[in-house]
Amino acid sequence: MTTTVSALFDRYDDATAAVAALEAAQVPRSEISIVANNADDYHRDKNLDKKDVASDAGIGAGIGATVGGAGGLLTGLGIMAIPGVGPVVAAGWLVATAAGAVAGAIAGGATGGIVGALTESGVPEDQANVYAEGVRRGGTLVTARVDDTDAPRIQAILDHHKAVDLAGRRGEYEGEGWTAFDENEPVPARDRIVEARSRVI
């Protein structure tokens, strides 16, 4: 059986280092996913090529770009929009799963977007809500589908690259009155996104 191992990162560079480490640890690219907030146009000045992942995934308005200059999975990063999160760069299986979750939510009233994709993949809903909120506020989510027996090793790799303490982050959010991810909440202002990216763990 497989397990979905996930981690939230405040700094995009830490997340991409974690992705590279997963690839080096022989996790297949097809089993890794990354979703990073782009509400502050962080990726605007990167070397961009045309690619519209949103039209492929069906979950938002495609801005139509791929972030270049990276290897492996990261060469496939595309800019898109996710309801409640806003513009993101994303690559991997979670994008396609999120598209299916959005379609299911529209048809049956279920939770869509990142939360729906994560819960469909076995992530507990309370954790999925924190991951989605973390991305909404400027973070980067990395996930990997791995064999159950390999999950502790893969989680250790993610944690080694400065992953956010999820319970602590939930506590911070709840201290502000937050209860769960709400896709109807406005996307945070650009300066709040920039501030969130600069957090030091």
Image (cartoon, rainbow, N blue to C red):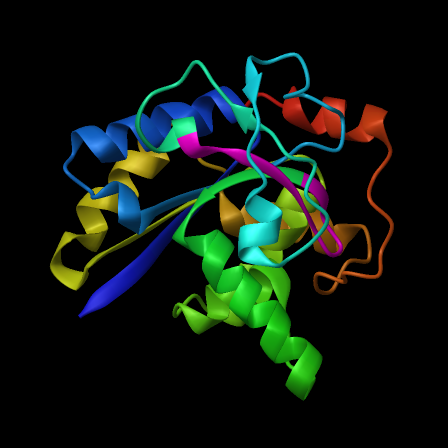
Determine whether, in the image, residue 53 is placed left or right of residue 154.
right
Q: Residue furthest front?
A: 50
Q: Position of residue 67 (x, y in %)?
A: 52, 23
Region of the chain picked out in magenta, as a range: 76-87
Q: Position of residue 83 (x, y in %)?
A: 73, 56
- The N terminus - image quarter: bottom left
The residue under the point 51% across, 48% down is 166
Q: Name which quarter of the figure residue 38 lies in.
A: top right
Determine whether, in the image, residue 1 is placed left or right of residue 180.
left
Residue 16 part of the magenta-drawn span: no
Q: Position of residue 45 (x, y in %)?
A: 66, 12
Q: Residue furthest bottom?
A: 108
Q: Let me know if residue 35 appears in the view.
A: no
Q: Position of residue 34 (x, y in %)?
A: 46, 40
Residue 80 part of the magenta-drawn span: yes
Query: Height in image: 156 above or below 84?
Result: above
Determine whether, in the image, residue 137 is placed left or right of residue 127.
right
How many callouts does the rendering have?
0
The residue under the point 56% across, 63% down is 99
Query: Height in image: 108 above or below 54?
Result: below
Q: Let me know if residue 191 appears in the view.
A: yes
Q: Nearer the viewer, residue 103 or 88?
A: 103
Q: Nearer the viewer, residue 101 or 13?
A: 101
The residue under the point 71% across, 61% down is 181
The residue under the point 35% across, 33% down is 73
Q: Name which quarter of the figure residue 107 lies in.
A: bottom right
